[in-house]
Amino acid sequence: MAISSSPNQRFRTRQPAWRKYLRALIGDSWAWRISFVYLAVMLIIPIAAMFFKAAEESPADFWRIATSPIALSAYDVTFTTALASASINGVFGTLLAWVIVRYDFPLKKLIDASIDLPFALPTAVAGLTLATVYSENGWIGSLFVPFGIKISFTRLGVAVAMTFISLSFVVRAVQPVLQEMEKEMEEAAWSLGANQLQTFIRVILPPLLPAILTGVALGFSRAVGEFGSTVIIASNTPFVDLIAPILIFQRLEQYDYTGATVIGVVMLIISLVLLLAINLLQAWGRRYDQK
């Protein structure tokens, strides 16, 4: 004889599909539930709200705002300058990491700790300091005046600020890889007749390349979203040195919330693409380490 199911069992079988998906999503662990709520409040809901706000505009108006001449100029200044700054840090950040790991010199620990200064220093303070030092009367800026080069309040000043705030990412990404690298591999290459350049290209660079690219990508992403330092060291002139984050702020000051939201959504989409690229680089680096 068949045994009838209890009311609770019948209720569980009649649950809507969305409740099953929700239960599977939040799980049974309170730690995961708290984390999910925190992520929803701090990350998912604000991002969704931005997309919904931008969706209030018609596709034609969205495209018109996102591709306006001043917006395209801001994208160009932002991404081109950030890429140049990240590339410079890819070279000199790797060199700094090499010196810190491979050489002993006075005040080494102090210099190593100062690499993290851009992480802790308020960006407004960094911008004020850079604008003062690189101005026409500053310690460094005055050295370029005889050559007709102006740094502060130009696009070059924006590049300096972006380079400053993104340097730490490259150094800290490359440094652990250098510390784990066995020097015996280099000595073996030397014993086989390889010179220093050949040893660097064929022995040292391949395991370093994923870390360098990851540090450059992280520094590039950080430079793209920089606001506090660039708003002080740049003149913020459209079509000259105006970057996208400052353009968003200017639109908000003009009560153009729609324009600010559209440009913000464009920046958010580009940031998500960059995040995907960074994850792919990290996955590639892990596969290289496993080999």
Image (cartoon, rainbow, N blue to C red):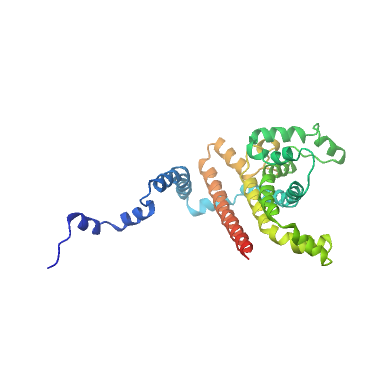
78 relative to 234, above or below: below
Total numbered labels placed on residues in the image? 0
Q: Report whether 245 appears left or right of 157.
A: left
* Residue at the right extreme of this rendering: 146
On the image, which quarter does residue 253 sit in?
Answer: top right
Whole-percent x, y for residue 183 in the image: 75, 57
Dividing the picture into quadrants, the one containing residue 168 is top right
Q: Quadrant of the N terminus?
A: bottom left
Give 22 or 98, whichever is nearer the viewer: 98
Position of residue 284 measured from the top left corner of the image (x, y, whole percent): 61, 62
- When the figure is inspected, residue 13 is found, relative to residue 151, above or below; the finding is below
Front in this rendered view, residue 166 or 101 = 101
Residue drawn at (60%, 43%) of the image: 245
Q: Identify which residue is drawn at 17% across, 60% down.
A: 5
Quadrant of the frame with the C terminus: bottom right
Name the spot of residue 29 as percent of width and height, x first. 38, 49
Residue at 51% across / 41% down in the picture? 257
Residue 104 horizontal side relative to residue 264, left or right: right
Residue ID at (20%, 54%): 8
Drawn side of residue 76 relative to residue 62, left or right: right
Residue 148, percent from left and from top: 84, 40
